[in-house]
Amino acid sequence: MRTSVAIIGAGPAGLLLGQLLYQAGIDNVILEQRSADYVLGRIRAGVLEQVTVDLLEQAGAAGRMHAEGLPHDGIELLFGGRRHRIDLHGLTGGKRVMVYGQTEVTRDLMAARAEAGLATVYEAQNVAPLDFDGARPRVRYERDGQTHELECDFIAGCDGFHGVCRASIPADRIRLHEKVYPFGWLGLLADVPPVSSELIYARTERGFALCSQRSATRSRYYLQVPLTEKVEDWSDEAFWDELRLRLDPEAQAHLVTGPSLEKSIAPLRSFVCEPMRFGRMFLAGDAAHIVPPTGAKGLNLAASDVGYLSQALARYYRDGSEEGIDGYSAQCLRRVWKAERFSWWMTSLMHRFPDAGAFDAKVQEAELDYIVHSRAGAMTLAENYVGLPLE
Ligand code: FAD
Ligand code: DHB
């Protein structure tokens, strides 16, 4: 089999890249190690920047998002027992975010791909990117006990943090930057109405909490927990009890509880691989970088990477120019590092760190107080939260 671009991974990065390339007339095949149902079963991000919304439109997969997604004009910061609104719309000259789950984005992109008749190989085993340092890369994989090879011009490594693409690059040719946080997020999804119309980011003495949502009838909540916690040890009741303790009295009164649809713990990490290109293989999304989820940037960065990559490849196939693909890594990394900084900063601001003393806690409170009472402070948060513009 032969294609122009072999995409490894059918997460948001791989699926969106596939549609953007298709719209530019570039054929592509996706190889995914899991089944489509497994990919759809992963409950992850929920906040889309305008840049991501625009890319989904360009990909021809934005119809349901516009019909069912929830545009949000603000978020709330809860600290010292009180909530303070950050007016995203007013502070950014009219920008907002869209609350629409990663699961739904993935489902819409899968449907668009099926409609376009593009090839996706699910349950591809032992996927191996080969010869990407030369002019004729290939990808070997197994399916139903048979070995196959896909010849291509380029490989897009969209296979997430634990994927095979980054791991296939010689270690002395890349630089890895990493920071691991001493806590995780326990997430719970339930069919209950959200506690408030906007998202609440809460800093409390018991740790961080986030009240998010997927629709008027489905809520997503997160609790900061020590890394030693196990999800099996958290009954739904224990989750709701702990969440209630981290909310203000009004939110406590409005909290509706119910059985969980999903519960999981995610560790928090900052990670960047430089560069994001090696020969004829490009890394995009979580394969190249991870942010802690506090700033809601992971999925959005995956989208902007593949937005840049599709432009660079379209230019290559249109007029043979390699300028775009040569500039891909540096262009992505400028945006990636700004999102890394913002996500690290939001995480540092809102969480309880095990080794922090009373002084650190006071500085955290002072910074939050500054942000909500200074237009400059609030603007900095708002500008980054809605997403920095593409170059
Ligand atoms: P992924 O979504 O990881 O997709 C990679 C795909 O590649 C997967 O389908 C995988 O099965 C496939 N793959 C892996 N290895 C191979 C292989 N060898 N061969 C073939 N296919 C392979 N972000 C937020 O903003 N908010 C959140 O609340 C949030 N929660 C998260 C919770 C968890 C547990 C995780 C892991 C991430 C979370 N994120 C969150 C981050 C966000 O979901 C990711 O940034 C986003 O999924 C990145 O998309 P991606 O396509 O790059 O990678
Ligand atoms: C969600 C996750 C985030 O990390 C975030 O900052 C906001 C919302 C969510 O899953 O809804």
Image: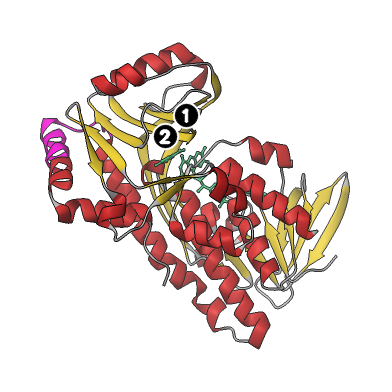
Residue identified by numbered label 2: 212
Q: Is residue 154 above or below residue 240?
A: below
Q: CA distance from mark 1 to mark 2?
A: 6 Å
Q: Residue 232: which disc?
A: none
Find residue 218 and report its horizontal and vertical position in percent. Answer: 51, 29
Indicate left or right for 375 with 71 as reference. Answer: left
Sequence order check, earlier mark of 1 and 2: 2
Residue 365 lies within the magenta run:
yes
Q: Are marks 1 and 2 in contact (CB under 8 Å)?
A: yes
Q: Residues within 10 Å of mark 1 (few under 14, many from 20)?
A: many
Q: Residue at x 53, y 24 (%)?
A: 191
Which quadrant, please, contains the N terminus? Answer: bottom right
Q: Is mark 2 within 8 Å of ligand 2?
A: yes
Residue 358 lies within the magenta run:
yes
Q: Which residues are magenta?
A: 351-366
Q: Residues within 10 Å of mark 2 (few under 14, many from 20)?
A: many
Residue identified by numbered label 1: 219
Find residue 66 and report its horizontal and vertical position in percent. Answer: 54, 50
Q: Residue at x 46, y 25 (%)?
A: 193
Q: Is residue 42 above or below residue 232?
A: below
Find residue 295 and report its horizontal and vertical position in percent. Answer: 36, 46
Which quadrant, please, contains the C terminus? Answer: bottom left
What element does badge 2 sit on? strand
Q: Is residue 366 above or below residue 163?
A: above
